[in-house]
Amino acid sequence: MEYTVITGACGGLGQAFCRIYAKEKESLLITGRSQVKLEALQKQLMEEYQISVRIKVCNLSNLNETQQFCEELKSLSVKRLINNAGIGTYGLFEQEKISTLLDIHQINMTSLMMLIHAVIPNMNKSGGEILNVASTAAFQPGPMMSVYYASKSYVLSLSEALWAELIHSNIKVSVLCCGPMNTEFASKAKLKHTWMQKLLMISVDDAALLAKKGLASGKRCIVPGTLNKMAVFVSKYLPDSLLVRLMAYVQSKRK
Ligand SMILES: NC(=O)c1ccc[n+]([C@@H]2O[C@H](COP(=O)([O-])OP(=O)(O)OC[C@H]3O[C@@H](n4cnc5c(N)ncnc54)[C@H](OP(=O)(O)O)[C@@H]3O)[C@@H](O)[C@H]2O)c1
């Protein structure tokens, strides 16, 4: 059986990916930390879409658990990997617990990279798709969320490099740089959406659908929404010294 693997499946965007690929009758391997949440989602998807859904409990902030999950993936046929799980936190760098910052590193960067590395050998034989979820945060530094923004820059850079490395193979790699979405992400990260984030906001269903289409067509970087595309364009062309000051102001309003 060929699986579409979705990390962070029980969250807002993750669930949207589950629904989209379930509609396509893909067999899913969904992962998250909570067995109870995963079982409930598995039951719902199997009943609604009559597809096969396998679950895997894995805490991606734990290196050993991630290594074990990678070994399991190597023995499976993975058609598609959606690296969606991610966390952030709002606050001054010096006041964050180092354990929180290390968790952001491990989940957003190291585990994401390890999962890609685990699935590529088998995908080389039969083809496949890899989607990494970054953010529009990837395009600039983010004072008050410095480690999160830096982690998403890593995801963008890694994904674009792999897109180029694998361009002549039968593996497609895309990175999704979405703007604000109405999920539990903001409340977990202890930040609020100001009028500006509300203006840029898109639904998880729209973001996931655009990502699915972009990935299938081999698009390198997917930025959903016209206003988000404009924001990314501006951030690329503003002088760095101005951009970081502007971001410090914007971020100061998100308390
Ligand atoms: N929402 C936004 O405004 C926004 C904007 C740009 C990019 N993004 C990115 O979109 C992705 C999805 O976020 P979301 O908005 O859907 O937020 P969310 O609702 O908080 O979902 C995040 C998912 O990641 C999982 N996760 C967190 N810690 C984990 C861990 N230690 N091990 C395994 N899984 C873990 C969560 O699982 P649990 O249920 O176990 O917590 C949850 O399923 C993230 O990469 C985020 O950075 C979000």
Image (cartoon, helix red, strand yellow):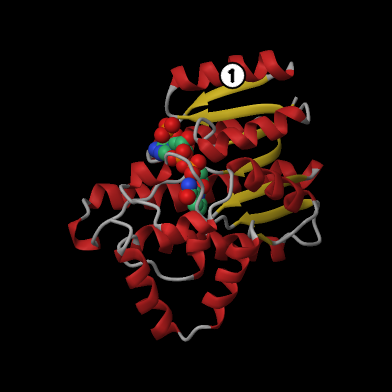
Q: Which of 201/212 is in front?
A: 201
Residue ID for mark 1: 42
Residue 151, quarter of the rendered image: bottom left
**Quadrant in which the N terminus is drawn:** top right
Q: Position of residue 195 (x, y in %)?
A: 43, 58
Q: Which of 121/25 is in front?
A: 25
Q: Is residue 151 visible?
A: no
Residue in view at x 59 percent, y 44 percent: 203
Residue in view at x 40 percent, y 84 percent: 242
Residue 225, quarter of the rendered image: bottom right
At label 1, which amino acid type do we have?
Gln
Q: Position of residue 9 (x, y in %)?
A: 54, 33
Q: Secondary structure at mark 1?
A: helix
Residue 251 sits above or below residue 84 on the image = below
Question: Is 253 positioned to the left or the right of 81 in the image?
Answer: left
Q: Position of residue 57 (x, y in %)?
A: 47, 25
Q: Which of 207/127 is in front?
A: 207
Q: Residue pushed farthest left?
A: 95
Q: Position of residue 26 (x, y in %)?
A: 75, 29
Residue in view at x 28 percent, y 48 percent: 100
